[in-house]
Image (tube, coloured by chain):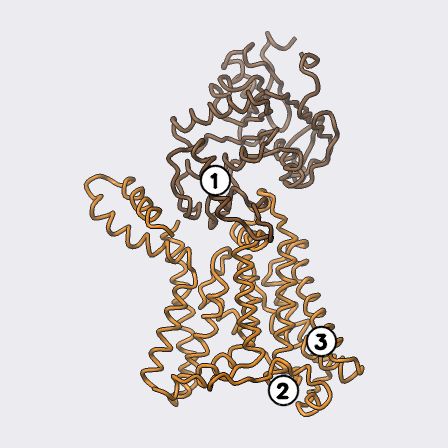
């Protein structure tokens, strides 16, 4: 199957990372192809967020290698990840509360004028454009994001990740703070980005959502990879069994 | 901002409430919300009102004795040193840090400028450059310890305060360089004390420097990417880092710049008192924090305006001069300043609560 699709967009090979003697991620290998959504599943503390933070630059792996389009890369901080067109929606959203939506969207990548000053008007205009697509009801452009609702904050974080032409998108529970309607919007967004050829890692607790949105699912338990399955070939019960029991179901084991 | 934004804001907050109370709530929330909105966008609004109010009050009580170009510019002269140091302090506090070593850096820089000129016979320009470099280096060391070694700013600068002050006394051998000698041999050291008269108002180079410094910093903080990063780092360093801001570099730059500004304050100090004295400026750290707090900059970082700090320093200056002209005991000044500090932090907490 892998041969059919050429070089993977991302290869995480044999990644390990430990915190104070506890192996949070233990020799895990996962890959991701263009136009593919790979779901990462597991209990809290299974190591899925930690694994993905090695790719987004928030953590540094202890061992293993990361390849982007076949090239070995070093990702030491979030700026390195961005240089490889990797964007991340963090579970904590990573927004600066006292800044407004536009300032957050462009934080670290401000639009500046020829004289090197920030161009607030341009940034707000761009923010209005993308928010009109993602969350048409969004109007609080001049308020600090601390004054926004959970869903509004989430849409700012999503806007930031998709605005800068990401090739690889990491979404750590992007729908955690959203209502059903907004969740549906995110699902549609994922489908659209997928059609555009992005590779997406989606961390989610909702097995049904993963089944609906993802092509493959990687299940982790206690820092180890239980297995990677094509979601079309398994039932939600199979996936749940992998999460809980920590091993592949009998009929898939071969 | 625009009327439409405000009305849509209160619209939304009202829409989130139950229908029955909407009418009353909308009015009430609208006013508080609008006030909060104004305070958020213009954090120096409260200190500006307090400043104008206190000038008006003393003007009414004292008449032309206070309300004259001479008296009002005297206030500027009296707050120039604290104003410059408080500008440095503002930068650090915006990153949710604190710098207790500002006064020590200031004094030591002035001693370096003086001693390099008089002990080693260096040209005053070189000696001044050395003093500015020393201040910057100490600030950068503070920043490195905070950003790289991850020590709390309070501890780093508490230690640095003692180290720099002790170095200052050891190096200078507690020796004062007299004003007459400086005037005769190195008048450049007293540059900031040069006075000029504008229709009864007496300004000094130091006063002009303080005003320009504050306006330039205010502009840089508001209109450059670096300024935005300073706010973001103070607001939430983790979010800033994940957003791609180089948090460590920003912190080191802020502390180094604060050190440089303190060294300029040291130069201005020579202009103000005429001599180079290793025992001067002992209260600069506490006075600068006072100005910052009264100026409405949040000690939690990420919110406030450096213009507020200028107003905060001027409020202290107005009360000091006003009460002295009224013949009141100087302790009344301290008592009122103390009240203002507590009131300023209470207002800050209130803004946090409304906006949260």
| Chain A, chosen colour in render | brown
| Image mark 1: chain | A
Chain depicted in orange: B
Give coordinates of residue B237: x percent, y percent. 56, 49
**Discs 1 and 2 lie in a common subunit:** no
Q: Can you tell which of label 1 and label 2 is closer to the viewer?
A: 1
Nearest to the observer: residue A41 or residue B121? B121
Q: In terms of image quadrants, where is residue B318?
A: bottom left
Residue wearing tag 2 = B274
Q: In terms of image quadrants, where is residue B234?
A: bottom right
**Discs 3 and 2 lie in a common subunit:** yes
Q: Answer left or right for A242 relative to B113.
A: left
CA–CA distance in space, label 1 to label 2: 54 Å
Residue wearing tag 1 = A127
Secondary structure found at label 3: helix
Residue wearing tag 3 = B128
Which residue is located at x 51 percent, y 78 percent? B79
Report the label total: 3
Q: Answer left or right for B19 relative to B168.
A: left
Hey, which residue is sitting farthest left in the picture? Answer: B20
Give coordinates of residue B221: x percent, y percent. 54, 58
Secondary structure found at label 2: loop
Numbered tag placed on residue B71 in the rendering: none
Nearest to the observer: residue B240 or residue B188? B188
Local crowd size for mark 2, using a 10 Å CA cut-off: few (<14), some (14–19), many (≥20):
many
Nearest to the observer: residue A175 or residue A64? A175
**Mark with earlier residue (3, 2):** 3
Which residue is located at x 58 percent, y 32 percent? A165
Secondary structure found at label 1: helix
Local crowd size for mark 3, using a 10 Å CA cut-off: few (<14), some (14–19), many (≥20):
many
């Amino acid at each position: 199957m892998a041969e059919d699709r050429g070089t993977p967009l991302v290869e995480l090979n044999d990644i390990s990372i430990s915190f104070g003697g506890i192996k949070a991620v233990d020799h895990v290998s996962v890959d991701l192809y263009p136009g593919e959504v790979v779901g990462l599943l597991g209990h809290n503390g299974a190591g899925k967020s930690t694994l993905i933070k090695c790719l987004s630059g928030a953590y540094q792996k202890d061992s293993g290698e990361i390849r982007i389009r076949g090239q070995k890369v070093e990702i030491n901080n979030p700026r390195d990840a961005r240089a490889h067109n990797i964007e991340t929606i963090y579970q904590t959203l990573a927004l600066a509360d006292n800044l407004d939506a536009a300032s957050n969207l462009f934080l670290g990548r401000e639009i500046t004028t020829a004289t090197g000053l920030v161009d607030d008007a341009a940034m707000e205009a761009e923010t209005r454009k993308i928010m009109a697509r993602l969350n048409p009801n969004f109007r609080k452009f001049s308020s600090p994001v601390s004054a926004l609702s959970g869903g509004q904050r989430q849409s700012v974080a999503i806007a930031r990740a998709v605005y800068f032409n990401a090739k690889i998108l990491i979404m750590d529970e992007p729908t955690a703070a959203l209502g059903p309607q907004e969740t549906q919007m995110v699902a549609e967004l994922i489908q659209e980005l997928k059609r555009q050829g992005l590779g997406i890692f989606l961390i989610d607790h909702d097995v049904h959502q993963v089944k609906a949105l993802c092509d493959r699912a990687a299940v982790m338990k206690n820092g180890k990879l239980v297995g990677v399955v094509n979601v079309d070939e398994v039932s939600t019960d199979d996936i749940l069994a992998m999460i809980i029991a920590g091993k592949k179901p009998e009929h898939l084991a071969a | 901002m625009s009327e439409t934004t405000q009305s849509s804001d209160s619209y939304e907050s009202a829409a989130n409430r139950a229908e029955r109370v909407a009418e009353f709530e909308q009015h009430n929330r609208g006013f508080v919300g609008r006030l909060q909105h104004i305070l958020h966008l213009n954090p120096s609004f409260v200190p500006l009102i307090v400043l104008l109010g206190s000038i008006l009050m003393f003007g009414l009580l004292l008449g032309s004795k206070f309300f004259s170009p001479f008296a009002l510019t005297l206030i500027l002269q009296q707050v120039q040193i604290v104003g410059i140091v408080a500008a440095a302090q503002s930068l650090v506090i915006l990153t949710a840090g604190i710098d207790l070593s500002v006064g020590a850096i200031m004094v030591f820089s002035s001693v370096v400028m003086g001693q390099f000129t008089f002990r080693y016979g260096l040209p005053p320009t070189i000696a001044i450059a050395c003093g500015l470099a020393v201040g910057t280096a100490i600030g950068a060391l503070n920043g490195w310890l905070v950003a790289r070694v991850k020590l709390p700013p309070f501890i780093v600068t508490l230690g640095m305060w003692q180290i720099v002050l002790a170095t200052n006394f050891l190096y200078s051998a507690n020796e004062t360089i007299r004003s007459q000698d400086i005037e005769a041999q190195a008048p450049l050291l007293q540059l900031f004390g040069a006075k000029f008269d504008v229709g009864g108002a007496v300004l000094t180079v130091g006063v002009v420097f303080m005003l320009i410094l504050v306006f330039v910093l205010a502009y840089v903080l508001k209109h450059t990417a670096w300024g935005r990063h300073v706010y973001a780092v103070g607001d939430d360093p983790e979010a800033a880092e994940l957003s791609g801001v180089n948090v460590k570099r920003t912190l080191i730059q802020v502390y180094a710049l604060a050190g440089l500004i303190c060294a300029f304050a040291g130069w201005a100090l020579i202009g103000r008192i005429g001599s180079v004295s290793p025992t001067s400026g002992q209260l600069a750290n506490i006075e600068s924090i006072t100005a910052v707090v009264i100026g409405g900059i949040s000690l939690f970082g990420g919110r406030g305006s450096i213009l507020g700090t200028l107003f905060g320093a001027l409020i202290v200056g107005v009360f000091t001069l006003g009460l002295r002209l009224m013949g009141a005991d100087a302790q009344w000044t301290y008592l009122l300043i103390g009240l203002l500090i507590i009131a300023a932090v209470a207002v800050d907490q209130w803004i946090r609560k409304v906006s949260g």
